[in-house]
Amino acid sequence: LFPLYSLSIPSLFPLYSLSTYPSFYHRVLPHALGSVSLALLLPSFVGVSRAFVSGMPLSWYGSVLEASLIYIPAALAGVLMPIKATTKREVDASMQSMGLVFAIVAFVFTAAGMTSSYVAAAWAAAAALSVHFDGSRQSPRLLWAIFLAPCYFGCGIAATTMLHVVEKIGIAGGADGALGRTVADGVVGFLAGVSTLLSVGTLAPWLVFVLGKRKRPLCRALVLASTLAAVLSASYRLPMLRPKNGMPYTREAPKRMIVQHIMRVDGSGRVAARSISACSMDAIPVGLPGILPERVRALEPEAFDARDWVSFYPLNFLVTGMTFRDDVSDPGWAEDGSPEDHHHHHHH
């Protein structure tokens, strides 16, 4: 497709003679590149800034719907903003340049051995066909027929990507420090941008043309919607999406944590100290109320030591958690490690 584009633009484009052929790139190609770049960067920026300002990473954990409400509107605004298509001629030029960008992506992906390049190739081919068949000037029915295949491929892959990866990143959680707090949200924003590009693709110039003067207010409204969703999400104020206790956990997306009961023995083999250490497998700290049982929370806290979690190496340096001194005089276990009758406690 890439050679097809680079050689046949004049033949597909009777309106540009060979002499004006370079000026087409100068004028329209930056818009297409801007559209693709902004679609990826704008939702990433929304995610990073939300996590940074609120100090709460992955506030959408457990709800792909919530993550989509935060990132997809910003990504859509990013796709539409840079494109200028007020006349039919500009629509064709924009579609062609978007097609060229998608063709280059397909070319690079194929060269790298990534078989998923067929989606980008389908969008590029549809753009070439729509201009060749004068689709934007004739009935929109022909346009939809041409773009049906890439829409079908793209939307399915986009939805699956969002569902699968958002959940995986949610489980992985955030790490300490400004970078650790923000990187996961930035990645999900970037992915939302990719998903949006897969779904809208080279049809974006036609959407801009149909919207006309409504494009600018719509883009503003989309950015506002993303910002609002981000603010509400960070303040746990989405009652329709969250269970009652303000935590994002559901039966499908439970809290993931690991608890260790650590016994430290002295030289004679007796238990010298006991502690309970709990560590979070997602971004929400175990220290928040309602996660650990009250009996554990009532214990005296100790410093959380990553070395207690060496079995996780190297993840033990990324996880966050809490440790409590478990100073129960006798946990109800005998010297030989068998459960004891509770009526005969030996107090040492």
Image (tube, grey):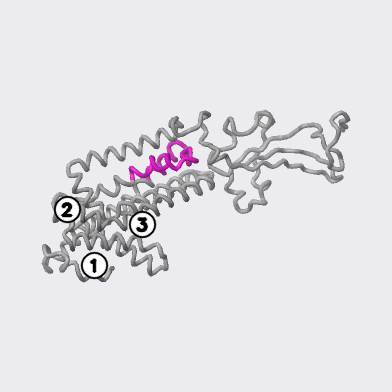
What type is the residue that disc 2 sits on? Ser
- Taking depth in this image into account, of 98 and 266 the one nearest to the observer is 98
Give x and y (percent) for residue 272.
80, 39
- Identify residue for label 1: 5
Q: CA distance from mark 2 to mark 3?
A: 23 Å
- Region rendered in magenta: 45-74
Query: Which residue was labeled with disc 3?
Result: 153
Give left or right: position of 112 versus 282: left
Dot 1 falls on a residue whose secondary structure is helix
Please give the residue where the numbered disc 2 appears in the rendered image: 139
The Cα atoms of the two marked residues, 1 and 3, are separated by 22 Å
Name the side, left or right, on which 89 lies relative to 203: left
- Answer with mark 1 or mark 3, whichever residue precedes in sequence: 1
**Quarter of the image where one finds residue 132:** bottom left
Quadrant of image for the C terminus: top right
Does residue 234 appear to the left or right of 256 in the view shown? Answer: left
Q: Residues within 10 Å of mark 1 (few under 14, many from 20)?
A: some
* Residue 342 pos. (x, y %): 84, 30
